Amino acid sequence: MDLAFNQEEQAFREEVRAFLRDKLPEDIRQRVHLGDHSCIKADVTNWQKILHAHGWGAPAWPVEFGGTGWSKAQQFIFETECSLGDAPVQLAFGVKMVAPVIMRFGSPEQQQRFLPRILAAEDWWCQGYSEPGSGSDLASLKTKAELDGDHYVVNGQKVWNTLGQFADWIFCLVRTDASGKPQRGISFLLIDMKTPGISVRPTRLLDGSYEVNEIWFDNVRVPVGNRIGDENSGWTYAKYLLGHERTNIAGIGASQRELRRLKQMAATIKRNGVPLIEDAVFAVRIAQVELELKALEITNLRVIFAEAQNHAPGPEASILKIRGTEIMQRITELQVESLGARALIADSPDHDLGEDIPRAAEAYLNQRKLTIFGGSNEIQRNIIAQMILQV
């Protein structure tokens, strides 16, 4: 299998780089570069509108739904270059998660109603999956939806809801039947966050940020027309969505960007008068994580080219999720270690580095979540064992 990009793909890479130079606003680029999330909703929304105006708002969508029709290789190139260029990450909950479910399983009316608004950044979506006691064991969820005429009445609680404080809509897994196998009694609902009875309560993270929430549903009425597909078949749609989420979590471009930052730090910061990059032990640790990242990139490319030949990914999605998240955590650990006590400083100029100090400690703490969300890495290893080792 030839994993090199062809001439057309190389030309596409240059086109993406030129677009980023010309169209990415400098203030947004600078905030992303420094890990400043103070304007995250405005930055993500504005960037999505810029992409949409250029016809690049949905790299993975089919053309008939307003997407680019790009190949898997082009999608990989685009996401990698956007990360390296300090562009905001597109809101995955809309573009990459609920939208594929709506395209595959939603009605024509649902597709016409929701997809154009996702593409144009008119709706901000969030995810309602995890509950207290129902995270990795998601099928045990207890949020209940009872049919009342042409509405469901939803009661329950969701946790670890990312950026739900900004959301216009939430896609939710709810229990509509408790009589049989847990996976068979789950339905997939699209819920307007302005509906009476919804409460959003912030959860402060280790880094002090307000990123995730608890969401409570108290007799929330949801039209039956907002259900995706058949009642009690939501587990099928949830698995389809999680396959998209775990592949994206590999984050090759983001890790490459942070590795580049780490090398810049190590080349500039001195210990005992010597650049840290010249310390043999530290240099070996950087080299090791760089080799692991290169191996992950090759694995990701193998999956991409296999998909181009109509080979559906199997346990590869779990492998990408495990290695991608662990590598990013390793890189942030090395960043904090290289900065030392200065990692605790968020916004002060540091002339030794020639730029503002990135929020290294904040990023390190925040990235502890990577190996948990999207299906914990322990669960992913169980999936690999079942699918490959058959144990």
Image: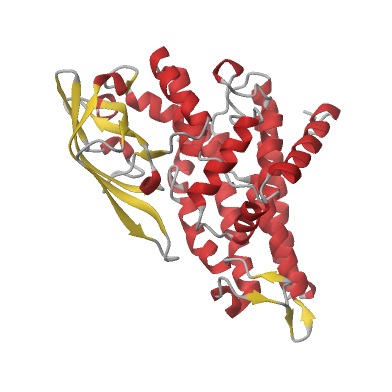
Colouring scheme applied when the structure was drawn: secondary structure
* Residue 279 higher or lower than 12, as above or below: below
Q: Position of residue 66 (x, y in %)?
A: 57, 21
What residue is shown at x 21% (from left), y 26% (from top)? 176
In the rendered image of this protein, does residue 16 appear above or below residue 107?
A: below
Task: Write the residue at 61% across / 18% down.
Answer: 63
Residue ranking furthest to the right: 7
Direction from residue 132 to residue 317 in the image, left or right: right
Q: Which residue is at the far bottom?
A: 272
Answer with left or right where residue 194 lies relative to residue 47: left
Q: Position of residue 196 (x, y in %)?
A: 21, 38
Residue 271 lies in quadrant: bottom right
Task: Name the image quarter holding residue 78.
Answer: top right
| Residue 280 drawn at (x, y percent) | 77, 73
Report the side of 14 relative to 314 (left or right).
right
Can residue 83 be seen?
Answer: yes
Q: How many marks?
A: 0
Q: Nearer the viewer, residue 284 or 73?
A: 73
Give the quadrant of the C terminus: top left
Which residue is found at the position 67% from the left and 76% from the top?
A: 350
In the picture, which quadrant includes the N terminus? top right
State the image quarter where residue 69 is shown.
top right
At 63% from the left and 35% from the top, the residue drawn is 51
- Seen from this angle, which residue lies furthest top? 108
Tell me where residue 72 appears, x and y as whole percent. Answer: 67, 28
Viewer can see residue 177: no
Taking the image as shown, residue 155 lies to the left or right of residue 259, namely left
Q: Is residue 381 above or below residue 117?
A: below
